[in-house]
Image (spheres, rainbow, N blue to C red):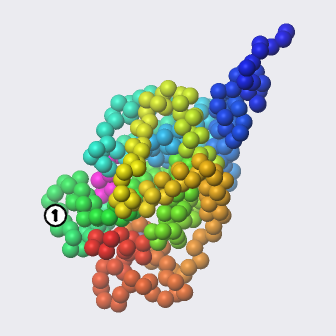
Amino acid sequence: MPGKELSDPCMDCRDHDAILTIRRRRLCRNCYIRFVSYKVLRRTERYRFRKGIPKTGPCKLLLPLSYGLCSSVLLHMVHEQMEQLSKPHSPPGFDLHVLIIEPSSISPSSPSHDRAFESLKQRFPLASFTQLPLHSIFELVPNLQHILPNYAGQALADDTSRSPKERLDAFRATITSATSIADVDFILLNRLVIAFAKSIDCLGILWGDSDDRLAAKTLANVATGRGSSLTWQVSDGMSPFELEFSFPLRDLFTAELQNYAILFSELTDIIVPDTPLSENVLTKNLSIDQLMMRYVSSQGEKYPGVMSNVTRTANKLQASRMSTDGSKCALCATFICNSEGVLNPTRSTNDSPSHQFCYACDRSRPGLS
Ligand SMILES: [Zn+2]
Ligand SMILES: [Zn+2]
């Protein structure tokens, strides 16, 4: 029986009309979904088949969800895989736990989004969900209660009688430059996610960074003096926090994830779109991270190969070879590196608190930024 005439046949199946173009190929809905999902499937293979992990017993993974495009799409794709894994004779697979740090506790201008939390639980029944405010970091990482006042120094009059939220807000208000705010907030979020993952015995964390986001992170880390953190912030493998880090969206661009999200109405309901950076915002008011994101999104459209190259190169980096005496930064909890074995230039022999912090954290301290 002759097939129906197609005006724009899909280049993969030839059975349906194409609706989207990806990497110069015109594809139909199903073939598009298969193409992008496969990029993630390949990255999560180790956990699906438990390669190098005990085949029985729990294998718990944490997925931090921000209600942004990338982490929401990652949840959708990983949950589809779990549905496949729940069939008889499937590989042993993994358990998925999703952590949401309440957006309104990070920025008062963000909506609380409680309705989305309820719809998440209904739409993704194979995963379990926890929502925490940012200030629960004091419960999960109790010693930060002493470290943060030390870090802020005279800029902060810490009042232990106040609520955890008020204390954290007062601390965050001492950091002034856009770059330092982004840097310190990233550290706090990261520490909360890691501490939570450990508290529920996770093997690893699935981070929702796309290719262009990883490229921006790579460039911003170098610019803010966090080059030695690059390996674990952008590469798959064991992190310094005894948890495996994995970036399953590393082969996909944000625009490709956007096209995927449009195909599923349940995703459009959950995702809070990023507020686009206005062209009128003065460059000096943007953090280096935002500047890099703006640069990567504008250049990435013109030269996608360049951005993939940045990310691929960073993924091949070995852990820092810079010497360290094994001491860890009190704020970001990574090893303090000393160039050629000499003391960190920010270290002093008197008992100034700066010796607790790595070079990059020290640069973001109030009064210095
Ligand atoms: Zn097709
Ligand atoms: Zn640090």
On screen, residue 201 above or below 83: below
Find numbered disc 1 in the image and state the secondary structure of the residue it sits on.
loop
Task: Give percent across and percent down for residue 36.
Answer: 65, 38
Quarter of the figure that contains the C terminus: bottom left
Q: Residue at x 64, y 57 (%)?
A: 306
Closest to the observer: 273 or 54?
A: 273
Q: Residue at x 85, y 9 (%)?
A: 1
Identify the residue under disc 1. 159
By secondary structure, the bulk of the magenta-drawn segment is best described as helix
Q: Is mark 1 within 8 Å of ligand 2?
A: no
**Mark 1 surroundings: few (<14), some (14-19) or many (≥20) residues within 10 A:** few
356 displayed left or right of 312? left
Can you tell which quarter of the image residue 153 is in?
bottom left
- Asked if residue 136 is positioned above or below residue 143 in the image, the reply reads above
- Determine which quarter of the picture holds residue 186: bottom left
Q: Residue at x 42, y 75 (%)?
A: 358
Counting from the top left corner in percent of width and height, residue 352 is at 29, 83
Up-down: is 140 above or below 57?
below
Question: Magenta segment, which residues?
Answer: 132-141
Is residue 227 visible in the rendered image? The answer is: yes
**Going by the picture, which residue comes out furthest to the front?**
280
Q: Is residue 40 left or right of residue 160?
A: right
**Magenta residue check for 109:** no
Residue drawn 62% across and 60% down? 310
Task: Work out whether residue 10 or residue 209 is closer to the camera in this orientation and state it.
Answer: 10
